[in-house]
Amino acid sequence: MKSPLTGSGVIHDVIGIGFGPSNLALSIAVEEHNTSLPADRRLNALFLERQPRFGWHRGMLIDDATMQVSFLKDLVTLRNPTSDFSFLCFLRERGRLIDFLNQKTLFPLRMEFHEYFEWAAGRVSHLVEYGSEVVRVEPVRGDDGEVAFFDVTSRGATGAGATVTRRARNISVATGLEPHVPPGLELDEHVWHNSELIPRAQRLAHSGAPVRRAVVLGAGQSAAEAVDYLHRTFPEAEVCSVFAKYGYTPADDSPFANRIFDPEAVDVYFSSPSEVKQSLLDYHRSTNYSVVDMELIEALYATAYREKVAGRERLRFLNVSRVRAVDQGADGGLDVTVEFLPTGEQRLLAADVLVLATGYRPRDLASLLGEAAKLCLRDDGDEVRVGRDHRVETAPEVTAGLYLQGGTEHTHGLTSTLLSTVAVRADEIHRSVLAARATV
């Protein structure tokens, strides 16, 4: 049986699936648009989020970790510098504006930026339904075959209770990325993805169980942060960092390289031939992928050297190496087989924890959108075709809008999954929705 439409036939101008920073930025754009308009000209928007409250990478909110983008690339400033949803307005309300300025930094603590996101999300909470997981998206066909709407069906995130179906002229998909687990491995009490680092480590620390060795797989910022965090959290444990490189690669945050994240760079990337797109991705991967802030690299090296001098080396770097096997140990822990690639020599590490700092991957669009996904056009590489305004190119009969926030690196470049242009992208989607409504 189909779920009934809610609200006596109410049709939403926008339904957002997921409520992380991307759809949060869009909700603020909608809120600011609506504030100055009469009721009949406002956008009717609703955002559905399966989490019970706003949360953004909570598992990596390490107390001293800082953002890797400027606070000016917040939810609104690049779209509307006068917005009172800015990070600076948040600081003023919290009474920390002068204290922050005295630090002379562009990069806030990650936990403080999360607090900013929560503050902003609280101000638009009337547009959000938390604890609501989207389970189905169906195209609505008229008698002439036109698809002018999508029906979005959701249920309580616990899986209990009846489903609810809502109709929308446009959908904004911003479900984020999902943890990547290497083939052959499964997450359990001893094998974690770094996205759950803090709660897992805290539970282990409070359990009283001894931690003799932790192994971290990966060579990026998250891996280095996990190594540092575990080393500090378990002062008696050996922490082994395993990666295929010779050493951590510094992130390229130089001014010219950072221009790859400028809004104008998205225009250039979008209009480039496919071979140029690939070249730009290859050239500038060092701005984001498998790279580490130099300050953290130097701190880890200094720690390792200090321990070597003291004669008690708890921090170890197994470079030019890969994890070849993970088996259950005789004592209930793990036996991690690590191969040194130049010689093929293998060593067995008895470990209590293996942390996979192995990155993320886009969520499967087809499994989320179902029948609606079949209406999306694809390019020669079987990637979804997306317009410059982030609207998916669809079959000719579809006039409803389907927008992607994330999963568009192949069309929009490195900023697809980053915060750098989140405010600008929200503006572009907002304007596109308004333009489409004006033609109805």
Image (cartoon, rainbow, N blue to C red):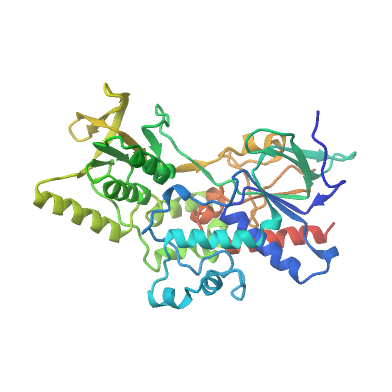
Residue ranking furthest to the right: 143
Q: Please tell me whether residue 35 is drawn above or below residue 375 in the rendered image.
A: below
Camera-side residue of 282 and 250: 250
At 18% across and 51% down in the image, what residue appears?
304
Camera-side residue of 160 and 250: 160
Quarter of the image containing the N terminus?
top right
Q: In which quarter of the image is residue 64?
A: bottom left
Instruction: Report whether residue 398 is seen.
Output: no
Residue 7 is situated, as x and y percent measured from the top left of the image, at 84, 47
The answer to whether 97 appears left or right of 123 in the picture is: left
Instruction: Report whether residue 286 is seen.
Output: yes
Quarter of the image containing the C terminus?
bottom right
At 28% across and 41% down in the image, what residue appears?
244
Q: Please tell me whether residue 196 is drawn above or below residue 90 in the rendered image.
A: above
Residue 152 is situated, as x and y percent measured from the top left of the image, at 74, 41
At 77% across and 54% down in the image, what residue appears?
13
Residue 77 is situated, as x and y percent measured from the top left of the image, at 57, 70
Residue ranking furthest to the top: 330
The answer to whether 334 appears left or right of 438 in the picture is: left
Residue 422 is situated, as x and y percent measured from the top left of the image, at 56, 60
